[in-house]
Structure formats: C-alpha cells, structure tokens
Amino acid sequence: MSTGALIWLALVGLLVYAIRDRRRTWSEDAAGKLILWAGPVFSSAVLLGLLTYALWLMPALRPTTHGVLRIEVTGTQFWWRVVYHKSGRPPAISANEIRLPVGEPVEFILRSDDVVHSFWMPSLGGKMDMIPGRTNTLPVLANREGVYRGACAEFCGTSHALMAFSAVAMMPDDFDRWLNIQSSPASGAAGPGRDLFTRHGCGSCHRIDGTEARGLVGPDLSHIGGRETVAAGVLPNTEEMIARFIAEPEVLKPGTRMPSFAMLGSADIRAIARYLKGLR
Amino acid sequence: MHVDWKHVAIALAILPFAVVFAAWIGFFNVGASSGHWKVTDWFLHFAMRSAVRTYALAVDAPPELPHHAVQTAAGHFARGCAICHGAPGEPRSPAVLRMLPQPPDLTERVNSWSDAELFRIVKHGVRFTGMPAWPSQRRDDEVWAMVAFLRRLPALRAEAYRDLAYGPAGSLVDRPVTFEQALAECTRCHGVDGRGRSTATPVIASQKESYLLRSLEAYAEDRRPGGVMAVAARAVDGRHWRSLAAHFAALPPPPVRAEAATALVQAGKELALEGDALRRIPACLVCHASQDRNPAFPSLAGQPVPYVEQQLRLFRDGLRGDTGYGRLMREVARQLSDNDIAALAEYFATADPRPAPSVESARDDEVYRPRDRSDR
C-alpha cells in the first residue's frame, strides 16, 4: 500500500516536472545517458530483484515427495472422495471434508470420476481443475487454524452449487491424533441402527470401516458423525439432517445418485441416523 | 335452375350444421344388429389396414421372437383374448359373434399380418373395434411374446393349447372366488411347484412372502409394469393375496443347477459379490444374498436367465422402478451394460438359493464377526 503510494507520488512528481514552464534542452550525450540508466538498467535491476524474491519464495510451495502428507481428492457428482496418504501409515478414507495440519505443506492430488470439477478453497490456496483421466496436483500450506469453506468451482451438473466441503486446518498434533482415529474403525457404534444399516443394504454403496459395509459407490461413512457438514457441505451435521437426507435426498440435492429411502419408515431412518451420527 | 359457385358455397357451409342436426335428432342408427353399410365397412377396414401397415414401419422387431415366453402369452391369451377371439377347441359365445365388427377368428387371420403389424395391433389396440391396448405400455417384451404365441396359434391343437394356457389346473375359472380357485389362477403359469412353467416366469417358490405380496399389489396398482400380471392379479380377489404369497413362500426352492462355472458366470459372480465402484455399480449380494436382509429384497438365486435379464433391462431403461424399493434398483441398474446383465443372469441362475456366505473381508471377519453372532 505504502509502496504504491510512493510510486504514485513519484509519478505525479515527474509529471509536474515534465509540464513545468521553464524548459531546458538536454545535450545529446546527457539524454542518451538518461535513457540508458532510467530505461534498461533501472527496469532490469528491479525485475531481477523481484524475480530473485519470487524464486526465494518458491521452494516452500514446490511439491516435495518425501515425508509429506498427500491428500487425494476425487470429485464426483456431487461429492468428494478423500484419501489421506501419509508415509508409514495405511491410507485413510473419508469424504466431503478436508483436514490438514497447520504449518505443514500438503500436496493435493486431484482427480475426477465423471465430469470436470474444480477444487477450490478460496482462503487456503488456489483453485485447480479436476479433469477426468488426468491427475492434477496442488500444494497447499495452511498458516492459521480454522474451518474454511471449499467448493466446486466448475459447473458440473444440477447440484453443482450444492457440491461443497469444509476444510479444517488443525495444529499438527491434533491432526495426527485425528488421522489415527480415521485409520481405525469408529468406536461406540452398536445398537439397532447398525443392524438396520446392514439389513437395508446401505453397505452396497457406503463403506463403514470395521463393519461388513464395504461399498465404494457412495461416500465413505466410517466417521461421518465427526464431520462438520453432511451431504457435501449442504447441511449441518445433526441427526435430524442425516435422517432428512436419507428420506429425501433428491429434494436436498437434485440429481444425486442416492435414492430416497423414505419407504423404510421414519423409525428405521431415525435409528440409522442416530447410528451414523455416533460414528466419530 | 342455374347452379353457380355461390350455391355450392352455401350448400357446403350448411352441410356441417345439417350433419350435426341429423345426429342431434337421432337420424344415425348406432344399432349393431344391421351392421355397417358396405361402403362404411370397406372404408373402415381400408383405413385400419393402411394405418397398421404405416405405423408398423416404426416398430423395431427383435431379431427373433421370444419363443421361450410363449407359455406366459398363452396364459394371458386365455384370460384376456380368448373371450372375443376364441381359442383352439373353444368356440365363442353367440353374444361375442354379434359384436360389430365381429372379432376375427385369429387362426385364419394371423398370417395376413407381419410380426411388426401384429405387434402394433396387440400393443396399441384398434379404435372403434373394441380391441383394447396392452394393459402396460412399457412391456414390449410381453407384446412380442404374444406375437410369438399368435404365430403358433394357427397350428395349435386343442390339447396343446389347453396344456399351454391352463397347465395342471386344466381349465380357467372366470371369477376365482375360493382360495383354491385363486391358487389355480396362479399355477396356470407359475406351476404347482411355483418354479414357473417357462423361463419368462420367475421362481416364486421360497421367495420372501412380503416381497410376493408387495409385487401383487404393485402389479394391480400399475406401479410395477406388467400387462400379464396386472390382469392376473386383478382377476384374483385381493383377500387372497396374502395367503397366496404365504403359500408360494413356503414351497421348497428348486434344486441348485450345478454347472461348470463359465467365464460369463465368473464375471457375473464377481460383479454380484464386489460390484464395480468405478462404474458406480453396487454389489448385488449385499441386499440379495442373506435371508436376514430386508424382506422386500427378493432372493435371486435360481431365477431363470431370461427373466432376470428382462427385469434388469426394464430397471436400466427406467421402465420399472416406480415403487420405493424399485427406485433403488433403477439407480443400481443404470450403469449395467448388456454384457453385465447377461453375466449376472447366468450367475444368479446357477447360484445357491441358500444364504450365501458373508461378503466380508478377512480382516473385518476377525475383528467383528464374533460380536455379531452373539448379538443375534
């Protein structure tokens, strides 16, 4: 800002100098020197300085390959499949939410299953297209803790505007603890909801780690209870909202591949929602 | 008198009013006893034959008629068609013979039409004649089966027809009232053993009772498309549906067809067990294997190949799937290719109808199975 003001003042000064009344003719020698120093020499020096500064900035953003956290995100109508790869650990599968450690560079691996999507976390990093049949990478460094919003930034169908996610930047220790939980089955999840989930065949599309639900067609639900939102950034994560989504997904998210399960009756849907909300 | 164009114009302007007036005072005789004028009769038939010929041009005929489904068509013919058209060994009622136009005796007439023309007539009916359209406009496969049956009709002897159409019951009860009569209406096509008298008919023996009941209701209310079953379900008093479902649910399943697993069966088994996440195809057996699943999910093991193929195609093409559970299958089948459908049908035909082993991975087994068992 202040630099801008200085440059502006300098320019105005030069302008005033140039339009003053009293004119003086320059010798050819002096004019040549002025052009040489103010032209090529000055601008080359400034640009070289800026380039050096930019190159100095770059290594932190450049993707590194060892010991780094890689988060694979696959866009699909209209949600996000997320897999965390950290060296020395089995990959942890999740969906519709990104968590990343503050101060540690993260490499996003971006893909698409169907049409072109675009992965965009406005406050955290740039925007990168997800193109079917291609793998794009996006390095991101979160500087501050917090919950950020992300969204699909490329029109991808009926519910494009409802294809969002939350990105949670956490302190590295918290993140490691969280990732540990993600890599193992959720605790405290028994009860009628679990049996109903199995009985009604939800596991043909959804996976819940540690149960016989192994479907990979829809979002992984292993720890859905701990996520910020449900239905890919559309609804607050409460038992009521989960139940509502089970009963009328096409109302909440037109064009979704999830069919309505209203025929199960509200008691069963409630029980399943309670079970899912308990998966943390 | 000199007639010029003005007189003609006035006459033409008056004519429509004169016709309406004549109709209003009841000038036109609508009685069927005296028949049409010769010219009317000729014109109506001329228009009908021409229209059928023209519209049949747009009909996509299958490479081969579905001869495997002839029995089903015969069963339907007995209830839906024979009353007007007669059947081998069954002369028509004099009441029917006084219809105008008189329904044709099909043994003589069938061969004057091509397959596509017969399809057109059977599917859409004929206006002004009493020939109704097929009860479901979404089941072209049923209409083709009827065409296949009609092709066979001219040469069909009375006994052969009775066996095809009535099966073990031996005759048709016009209005089934008692449970036994209602059951006889089912066994005409489904067989006394509930295993189906043709491969177009599903095995309903040992099928889940609530699934059978739901299916009957869905057919009768036209939520599941099927002209044959819509007519059959409504012929039977709804009081009996539950006991009919229970009756067939209690019958033993057919023996497992032990056959060498071909590559096709293997492919079907893989898809049924694992699904294909990349193509968005869920695993069939998550819902269709275990007996402890929601009873609205039917058992598919041992079902005839053509039946399963046909139903999967109906789901995939969005023709079936108007019920809550049907919508699940419409979504599931959307990505299936013709190859997938053939493979799945082959696999299910040879699969063991008893509860399949768990679909879980070994790791999950170790950790979670024991607790599950003690829970139940």
Image (tube, grey):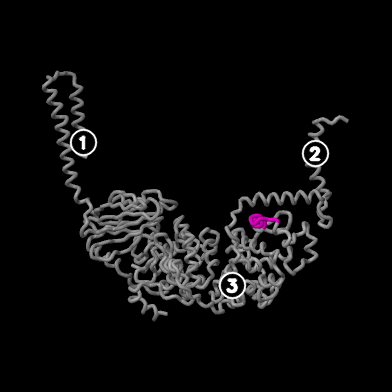
Q: Residue at x 21, y 54 (%)?
A: A64
Please give the range of residues in magenta. Answer: B112-121
Q: Is residue B120 magenta?
A: yes
| Residue at disc 1, secondary structure | helix
Q: Nearer the viewer, mark 2 or mark 3?
A: 3
Contact flag, marks 2 and 1 (Cβ < 8 Å): no
Residue position marked by numbered label 2 in the rendering? B14
Mark 1, Cα crowd under 10 Å, few <14 / some 14-19 / many 20+, is few
| Quarter of the rendering containing residue B151 | bottom right
Mark 2, Cα crowd under 10 Å, few <14 / some 14-19 / many 20+, is few
Amino acid tagged 1: Ala
Q: Nearer the viewer, residue B157 or B190?
A: B157
Q: CA distance from mark 3 to mark 1?
A: 89 Å
| Residue at disc 3, secondary structure | loop
Residue B192, horizontal then vertical, whole percent: 62, 77
Q: Does the magenta stretch mainly form a helix, a strand or a loop?
A: helix
Q: Callout 1: residue from which chain?
A: A
Q: Is residue B98 magenta?
A: no
Q: Callout 2: residue from which chain?
A: B
Tell me, for residue A5, which label it has, or none.
1
Name the quadrant of the C terminus of chain A.
Answer: bottom left
Q: CA distance from mark 2 to mark 3?
A: 64 Å
Q: Nearer the viewer, mark 2 or mark 1?
A: 2
Task: Please determine if labels 2 and 3 lie on a single subunit.
Answer: yes
Residue B303, horizontal then vertical, whole percent: 53, 71
| Quarter of the rendering containing residue A4 | top left
Task: Please determine if labels 2 and 1 lie on a single subunit.
Answer: no
Give the number of marks: 3
